[in-house]
Amino acid sequence: MSDTVISIKNITQRYGAADQPDAVLALDDVSLDIKKGEFVCLLGPSGCGKSTLLNIVGGLFKPTSGTCTVNGRLVDGEPHPDKIAFVFQESTLFPWYTVIENFRIALKFQGIPEAEWDDRAMRALKAVGMASFARHYPEQLSVGMRQRVNMARGICVDTEILLMDEPFAALDEQTRMVLGEDLSQLLAATGKTIVFVTHSLAEAVFLSDRIVVMTARPGRIKTIIHVNEPHPRSPDFMLEPRFSELRNECYALLRDEIRATMAAQRDPQPQIAGV
Amino acid sequence: MERSSFATRSVQIAFLAIMGGAWYFATQSGSISALFLPKPANVYATLERLMQTASFWSAVTVTITTILKAFAIAIVAGLVVGYAVTRSKLATQVIEPVIAGLFTVPITLFFPMFILFFGIGTGSKVAYGATYAFFPIALNTIAAFANMEERYLRAARSMGAGRFDTFRHVLLPGTLPVLITGMRIGFFICFASVLGGETISSVAGIGRNIALAAELMESARMYAWIVFVIFTSVTLNLLVYSLENHIRSR
């Protein structure tokens, strides 16, 4: 229990007032403990509240009810940039700044002394093999390169927790796999705690220590799947029968939830026969 | 890129040459009264003479000062109002159409009121130019801040950026291209309305001199002033565009 870093207790998130017909219950009584150095994936159909949960942990949203503590400190709708860094999709790099300026600004925002900015930025860029692109503008890089840079931006602030909100969603399958390997290596090297939101089954199995499978809206935790495979993981892991089994297990769990989500997006079935 | 900008320039220069040539040949034959359209050579000679007089430059100074004052007021008012409106989604939805609607009203119709309130001196022209230029600046400011991508603000917040840092490093650079477009449009509207206002009713400035020359049927003198204004406007346009490109490419 002592090595629990993130503790989510009975979190409920509702959009709109409860008595309104258009109120949406995004998360319904979700509780989860995440250990130090763990890689946890939140997997679920679109709109199941997994990004909402991540934003609550990161202090970007205040939950309707329930609490989230990080290292025993209550996160109450206030970001804790000294403890938690976010990595969003690659399009959150500021296009008006060069790569290196994007790092400086992230470090400045976080309150790091100016003397350390360039050193830390270059170290993080080197770690993802992008040091020679420091003076480029994001638009001059490919989507994959941008996401490498964006990941490095999240790493350079050197927080113990990294929250990643579908960071690879805009990437093609191949780039996604390579970046996934990089991330697994990073985890092994730094011991960071990572919470990762994804749609991708393979990504979830390849990266996670635990996969938190969520239900269709309102989001609840359906099952937690353990993946007992040490980091860094090699691509060979994907060829093992165990990988496919876990992936299929996830799919079997998700299938009904995805159907439920799709059904909610279609016309309602007529209530009275013959109408 | 290189080629197309060369082609664009060539077409523009050719257009100017055709206009100049048409003017030259139309007046050469003598079929058009010099009262309506004097010969280019006469206009040029008049302009040269005008530019050697102190009264020419004092008129230019009056107009430029008026434009700059009006523009400064329009920028401050447009930016402040535009920014304030976008602080609330509701205010944006309510006020933006009102400002856009008012902008379609020909403010020229209210010019007599400006004279009434601010007198026949430069004050009325400052107020008139500032009012006209306020609209495009405010509208572009609203568009810039209302369309700011939420994801950049969220990223900045997650990094722990405070209000001032977010404004300085995210909001401002993110909106600058659109703000500058608003200011460019505002500047030329300001330029045009101050000159127009001076022509309608004033005691000094370029517009006043154009109106006076027309009343005295001194066509060459009137055209000399107009040529000077066109030349200034084209030069300013080029200047503002290159300034805009310079800031954008930063």
Image (cartoon, coloured by chain):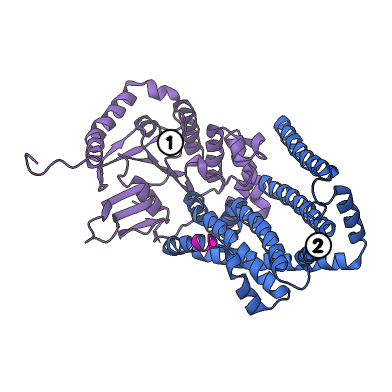
Quarter occupied by the N terminus of chain B: top right
Q: Where's residue B126, x and y in %?
A: 69, 70
Dominant secondary-structure state across the stretch colored magenta: helix
Residue A112 seen from this side: no
For the point 64% across and 41% down, the residue is A122
Foreground of the two, A242 or A24: A24
For the point 80% across and 43% down, the residue is B26
Q: Is residue A268 left or right of residue B98?
A: left
- Label 2 marks which chain's residue? B
Q: Which residue is mark 2?
A: B217
Assign a secondary structure to mark 1.
Answer: loop
Q: Where's residue A85, x and y in %?
A: 49, 49
Q: Is residue A227 magenta?
A: no
- Label 1 marks which chain's residue? A
Foreground of the two, A19 or B80: B80
Q: Which residues are magenta?
A: B101-105
Name chain A's colour.
Answer: purple
Q: Which chain is blue?
A: B
